[in-house]
Image (cartoon, rainbow, N blue to C red):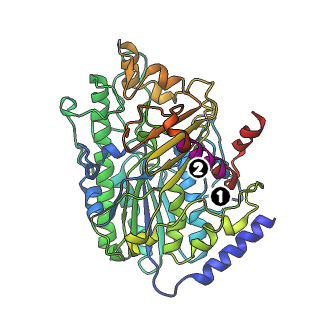
Amino acid sequence: MKFLLLLIGFSATALAQSPSAVRPNFVLIVGDDHDRSAVGCYGSQARTPHLDYLAKEGVRFTRAYATTASCSPSRSTLLGGRHSHNTGQYGLAHATHHFRSHEELKTLPALLRDVGYATARIGKYHVAPASAYAFDQALGEDGSNPVRMAEKCAGFLETNRTKPFFLYFCPTDPHRTGSQPGLPYDANPHGNRSGGHEGVRETVYGMDSLRVPYFLPDAPETKAELAQYYQSVSRLDQGVGRLLDLLKENGLWENTIIIYLSDNGMPVPGAKTTHYEPGVCLPLIVRNPFSRQKNQICDELVSWVDVAPTLLDFAGTNPVVIGNAARPKGGGEYGERGPTDYFHGKSWRPYFDNPTTFRADTVFLSHTFHEVTMYYPMRSVVTKQYKLIWNVAHELPFPFAADLWRSATWQSFLKSSKTQYGPRSRQAYVQRPEFELYDLQTDPEERVNLVGNRKYEAVYAKLLASLKNFQEYTNDPWRVKWVHE
C-alpha cells in the first residue's frame, strides 16, 4: 500500500511539473534481435537507408547497451526503467516460460498517460502482465510486415496531431522464424518469404560477397544465414521509412522525438543471451527535432534503463528528482524506496542541450533467464575501458536457447573440425569461469580474460566493489550469494 501511495504522489508531482509549452511526441522503435553490425551507418553491409537518414538527422550512440540480451527482460527494462531482477521479468513472458513483472510496477506508458499523453503500441509486446504495461490502444499484434505496421499507425497519428503521444513500434524483424528440422540445418529464413511481403521491396543479398562478423565462424552456412538476416533487416528499415513518411505527412516531424534501438544482439551463439559485446552493445539512434545535434556521434555509455527517465525528462516530469536521487546501499524489498529512487537509469536530455556537459562512464548489466530451462545469472559492470562479468552459476555449462542451438551457424560448426568459435574455443564458450575481465580498448573482441593478472588486481577489485553496490541499490535477490556462498 505504501508503494502505491508513493506512486500516486509521484504522478501528481510529475503532472504539476509538466511544462505549459507544447510537449514533444515520442516514437520508440524496437528492432527484434537487430545487431549493431547490421546497420549501415555503423559500417555494415546491410542496406538501411532510412536508419542511416535518421542518424544524419540526429545522434548515433556507439556505447549503448541493453542490460540483458534477452527479449522480454530487455523490453521490461526499456518500459520500466529498472533492471529485470528488480521488476520480476526474469525471462521470457510467453508459453511455458511465463515470467511476469510485478503487478504494481509503474511503467513508461502509464507515467506518460498520467501527464496527458495518448499511448499506443503495435507489433511485438512480449511483457507481462498487461496491467503493468498498459497502453491506451493496441494497434495490432502482428509485427511480421513493418511496412504494413506503419500503415496501421496512420489513424493514430492523424487523431493525435494536436495531443502529445507515445507510439511504441515493435516489428519482429529480423528475429528467426520457425524451426529447422534435422540436419543439414538450412539457413533460417528470418521471416523472409518466397513470395515476399505486401508493400515491401525485398532486398536480396548474395552470400558469397558477405563479410562475416568477428564473433562468428567464417563458413558457408554462416554466410547463408547472414544473407537471410540482412534481407530481414532491410525490410525492417523500409517499415521505419514508411513510418517517418507518415509523421511528415501529418505535420508531426518537427515535434516528434524518435528513438531506434534493438532489444538484444544477433540470434546466434556468441551474441544473444550473452553479456559479450555482440549481445548487448547495440544500435541506438535518436532524432530530436528540438536540438541542434545533427549527424553527431556520442561515445558516452548509456543503457536501456535510461530510456524511460529520458522520455519523461523531455515530457517535463523531472526524472532527475524521481529517478536519480542518492542510491542508498541498504537492502529493502521491491519498491520500498519509492519515487526518490524509482529509476535505475539516467536521463540523456542534457546531451541534447549541451554535449560537453553530458558524461556517462558506467553501465550495469543483469541477466538471469532466457527460456525457463536456461538458468544462468550474470551480473556485469562496463566502464569506458573495462568490462567485468560475474557468471553467478559458473559451475553449470552455459545453456543454449533452442533457436540458437538449431541454427545452421552453430550446427555447421559442431560438424566441422574447427575448435575456435569466433573469439573463443567451443569449450571456453560452454564452460565459463566465475569472473571475466576484459580491457575493451586493447581487446574489443574480449579474447583475453585478465582475472588473475596481477597488473589488473586493483581494477578487478574496484569493479567488483562497484558491482556489489549496484546489486544492493537495485535490490538484486542474487546479492545474497555473497553471504550464503
Q: Choose the circle earlier in sequence order: 1 or 2.
A: 2
| Disc 2 target residue | 127
User: What residue appears at the point 38 percent right and 38 percent down from the top-left corner?
Assistant: 443
* Label of residue 132 in the image: 1
**Quarter in which the C terminus is drawn:** top right
- The crowd level at tag 1 (other Cα within 10 Å; few <14, some 14-19, many 20+) is many
Query: Type of residue at label 1?
Result: Ala
Whether residue 463 is in magenta: the answer is: yes
In this view, which residue lies farthest toward the right?
A: 1
**Quarter in which the N terminus is drawn:** bottom right
Residue nearest the viewer, comparing 312 with 167: 312
Name the side, left or right, on which 227 lies relative to 347.
Answer: left
Residue nearest the viewer, comparing 274 with 150: 274
User: What residue appears at the point 40 percent right and 69 percent down from the top-left corner?
Assistant: 257
Q: Position of residue 347 (x, y in %)?
A: 51, 67
**What is the distance, in whole Å, between disc 1 and disc 2 at their CAs?**
9 Å
Residue extent of the magenta highlight: 459-469
